[in-house]
Amino acid sequence: MAECGASGGGSSGDTLDKSITLPPDEIFRNLENAKRFAIDIGGSLTKLAYYSTVQHKVAKVRSFDHSGKDAEHDHEPPYEISVQEEITARLHFIKFENTYIGGCLDFIKDHLVNTETKVIQATGGGAYKFKDLIEEKLRLKVDKQDVMTCLIKGCNFVLKNIPQEAFIYQKDSDPEFRFQTNHPNIFPYLLVNIGSGVSIVKVETEDRFEWVGGSSIGGGTFWGLGALLTRTKKFDELLHLASKGQHTNVDMLVQDIYGGAHQTLGLSGNLIASSFGKSATTDKEFSKEDMAKSLLHMISNDIGQLACLHAKLHGLDRVYFGGFFIRGHPVTMRTITYSINFFSKGEVQALFLRHEGYLGAIGAFLKGAEQDNPNQYSWGENYAGSSGLMSTAPELGPTRRARSGTFDLLEMDRLERPLVNLPLLLDPSSYVPDTVDLTDDALARKYWLTCFEEALDGVVKRAVASQPDAADATERAEKFRQKYWDKLQTLRHQPFAYGTLTVRSLLDTREHCLNEFNFPDPYSKVKQRENGVALKCFPGVIRSLDALGWEERQLALVKGLLAGNVPSRPLWSRSPWERPWLVDSYSKWLQRLKGPPHKCALIFADNSGVDIILGVFPFVRELLFRGTEVILACNSGPALNDVTHSEALIVAERIAAMDPVVHSALREERLLLVQTGSSSPCLDLSRLDKGLAVLVRERGADLVVIEGMGRAVHTNYHAALCCESLKLAVVKNAWLAERLGGRLFSVIFKYEVPAE
Amino acid sequence: MPRKRGRRTLHPRVHWAAPPSLSPRRHRLLLRGARIPTSTTVRSALCWEHFIGRRHGRIGPPSSCSDWLAARWRNGRGSRARVRLCSGWSAAEEARSPALGAWLGRQRWLLRMGAGRFGAPMERHGKASATSASSAGDPAPGGPEGRRREPMRRRASSASAPAAEASAEGVRRDRPGSYSGPTSVSRQRVDSLKKKRPLFPWFGLDIGGTLVKLVYFEPKDITAEEEEEEVESLKSIRKYLTSHVAYGSTGIRDVHLELKDLTLCGRKGNLHFIRFPTHDMPAFIQMGRDKNFSSLHTVFCATGGGAYKFEQDFLTIGDLQLCKLDELDCLIKGILYIDSVGFNGRSQCYYFENPADSEKCQKLPFDLKNPYPLLLVNIGSGVSILAVYSKDNYKRVTGTSLGGGTFFGLCCLLTGCTTFEEALEMASRGDSTKVDKLVRDIYGGDYERFGLPGWAVASSFGNMMSKEKREAVTKEDLARATLITITNNIGSIARMCALNENINQVVFVGNFLRINTIAMRLLAYALDYWSKGQLKALFSEHEGYFGAVGALLELLKIP
């Protein structure tokens, strides 16, 4: 821990709260590689952004040289694994209170190694005020950027790169936050920024936006007028007062004018006829709380009304709200939502953003990084390095709150390949990958959180075991445990912290945390061993399959696909293969197979070993026989024991050596192996490798096969595609099986044909 | 929240009173008894039948019928069922009919006394409540939105439009002669006017959230014979109202607004404009009781929310039955009428030239010869914004709770002032730029990226976030800033509505504008500036009284 006090400020009499302790491995990480700084200084918070490179250990697989014909020995692995260092790009965003700015700048200067950096992009009202301080401390030239341009650039960036960035807020409902799936085309939209005043901007494309209006009645009015009326100086305190007040004591309501008649007239008597109207006609004293509440309503209603009028004028229904007036305050999100609902009669929804506070900093950063073309890449939120929404929630322990209240983090990893929608989705704008929304389903949430907690020991052990030669493996594994445990606890209290909570996000968070502590692929050795064993069985399996009659073979192939999903021979209470299965459209599938062959099948593979080699490949082989081309999509990066693209390439090569069908198909490009662009045990069809999408379109894929629990049950179970699809899985979780109305190891065989 | 309001009847009597100028084509159609091409429902068809009947005298007052029937007949083409059809009489209203019985009883009595034809109390009552029912809630922070009177609009464009327009135009064309007496109308019409004239006194009442507006017609053509017959209480009311300019401690007659030599229903007289705070309403009702108003058998046509709130008090304390009227109907009726009669020979409507320049700024008359479409912004305690397409085709577009009540209320809290006049006076001496954060305070000048001028307010009260600046401002500065904030906001919402409705003339009315030149000039300037000259802000001399005038017109059945 580096002590980084306010001494840099030059005055020795600084109060305690201005000095901070910065844990370098948690905040301002990777400063040594940092370049391209940007800073957004608002009225009370500073947001700092920088780009850095992160060194990661990655497990690489490499095929042995097999030129020396059949040199295979029984215990020789099919390929070798080497751990290498890989460099990836990451964006860091840190938010802290303006009081710490001096200390933070000192800290950055002390840790900054890269000397290429000469300029810092600055935006926000405070950029002017702190210009000299920044230039003096960092010795970087301050390049000022336009506030709104930065804001919009940032907004476009998060909407494009963070699924479920936007949410609607519903007070008194559970969950209060409802995250929205991003529309594939984020434009056009209206951005209403409520800072001290209000700016309403219509955004039409990446670079085209227009200030369409605004209002002087905004956050500054609430704060300034509130301070005059209540003698309360701080914005947060005013909000707190407002949350306790009764505006009906101050406002003139419809019922005050109409008397009791509003009821017989069918009116809502509670509507405000005149804000502060009662203070004009009565002499009594009003409480601070009541006045603050009335003021809050007045301002929120006014902004909501203007926003609706502008949305109507421009025919837009997506309106995002931001600015310090909103910034995660449930009180203002609630009143703005109410106002928008009222004035638009439900036609417009008030949308808020998880990373709203960072928009300016992100935009300023992007402005400065234009030569790196950050917009060409896809970026992904790193759950391990990011604080969740409302990290200052009171439920958290006081110590933790103190720190997360001080520093809020966002990290975005640059993905090596751009991600796009699968072209076969029926309706990309309504596609939701996840089957169960754990933010919504409290019972399921409780179960899965506990489930992941209980599994943590095993994961830690596996991680340590995967690196027997590393001395610090145990220490890192423990850090991983702590980090992931903390995340789980946060999610228990704030399921909405990282967008909609799902089994997928829990799994992804675990992968991110493992990566963070350099456990890139804990299963690499296991996968290697299993692949070796399975490859040996391959010729025998093929022989016995080929010996079967056509109809029997089809069933055996499907069972093979499913069986690969089941861990080593469980004690069956009842054979899982006995039909009917829990979901069973096998007969329909068989009927279909009797018809003309598919043109091209897209298969998303699941596990290494038995699954890919004895399940998927024989199935692929049969499709190839039928004259169907096959695209086999595997994960780009490791996740659990899922087969990765590079492993699949080696496996395919080995199989090709044994099987002429696969061999010729590979050579003739009737069998193609591609990567998904993902490193998740689940599957998000709206974020897939662009190359895959291109190929799918080129080859005219008309069948999609998704196998495994992670991809076909936790996600995509309800996904609607515009071509035929097979979703196969064995439910390996008793709780989930019961939920689905079956038992452990129930079989799901879902064959779907889109409606004509 | 927003409800379709019942279609309002095209009341036959309306057409009696209006200059009977049907278009020739329509007239022919009527004579032939041809079905009027109409897209409306049975309701309007029914109304048309009445219309035809009345115009050609096929249905005359049956001389031999009982009083009750006569009343029914006279009142209304107003059989109950029809009323319901025509005005969407609500079930709730029907449930109240026992009370109506008493009311009708009195009307029968009036009729027996040969008191002249009285305006269909039953129908009127039903109609009033039906229309009000749907209009209520106006003042909400917007209240019911977009209360478009679709059926009426359709109607305006088909069946009844020509008649309605003709009569409206008739009135307008007469200007300024329309207040010069009955010379321009036929003898027959004078007779009919006389018959249907209600008893004196003629009042129109608009009970708002903060102020009560009362218009009183003082007949100046009282004959000696009439004077002799005039009951004492009526005389005393007349004398009391016309000989004072202030009533009690809070009632005020706006003498400068008095309309002289006005002809209403064939009677010549002066129209007086009186206001007092709504919280003095109980005293007013008490006065009515003390002066024995109920013995005059007059009808109080009242509009505004207070018509509902105080209805029971009027009845139980003053023994007076209020005839409740929809406030938006009254408002529009009032403004169109007052504009048509002008302001004692001068123009009623005006605008500001060079509003931003204190030296060159000029208040100039505006001839509202093409009133439609019109955006009407009524700034009372709250604000209602209406889009008016024709005399009886309008919709409430929106409203805001930031209105006159907010200005005055905040001023009371911030400066301790006690009257509206005081608040305005303070505002006139203050400097809002000490309180507000301007664009130039943030950007050092214009914000060119968005084309915002440096003088524009970026954040109302924005400077008050700082302690030092809070300590440096005066009460006058705060009053000024409050006024500027509320006014700018109303201007901004009005501008957006005008854009959305594609209307370019905006008339601002309501008592917030009384003696409030700062606000009017700011509205004029802001509308012109932000619309790049596309929108024109118009004002009207009788700014706050149109609802009350509309109520009076309803009493007199003047369209």
Image: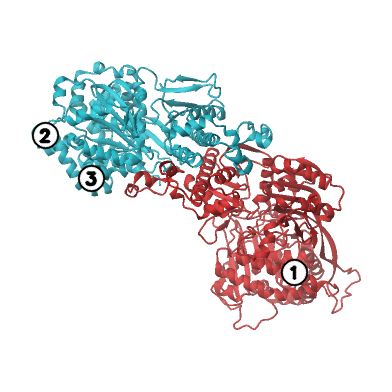
Chain colours: A red, B cyan
Q: Is residue B121 left or right of residue A311?
A: left
Identify the residue at image location x=9%, y=37%: B66
Q: Is residue A463 left or right of residue A243?
A: right
Type of amino acid at the residue the image marks with label 1: Phe
Q: Are circles 1 and 2 on residues that touch, CB within 8 Å? A: no
Q: Secondary structure at mark 3?
A: helix
- Vertical side of A257 occupied by B483: above or below: above
Residue closest to the eye, A26 or A102: A102
- Chain at tag 2: B
Q: What percent of the width, then of the height, locates residue A581?
A: 57, 74
Q: What percent of the width, then of the height, locates residue A303?
A: 54, 43
Report which quarter residue A552 is drawn in: bottom right
**Cα distance between the residues tagged 1 and 2:** 98 Å
User: In this figure, which residue is indicated by the disc labeled 1?
Assistant: A480
Q: What percent of the width, then of the height, locates residue B400?
A: 46, 40
Report which quarter residue A719 is drawn in: bottom right
Type of amino acid at the residue the image marks with label 2: Arg
The reply to whether residue A185 is visible in this rendering is yes
User: In this figure, which residue is indicated by the disc labeled 2?
Assistant: B112
- Chain at tag 3: B
Q: Residues within 10 Å of mark 2 (few under 14, many from 20)?
A: some
The reply to whether residue A531 is visible in this rendering is no
Residue closest to the eye, B348 or B498: B348
User: In this figure, which residue is indicated by the disc labeled 3?
Assistant: B316
> Which quadrant is home to the C terminus of chain B?
top left
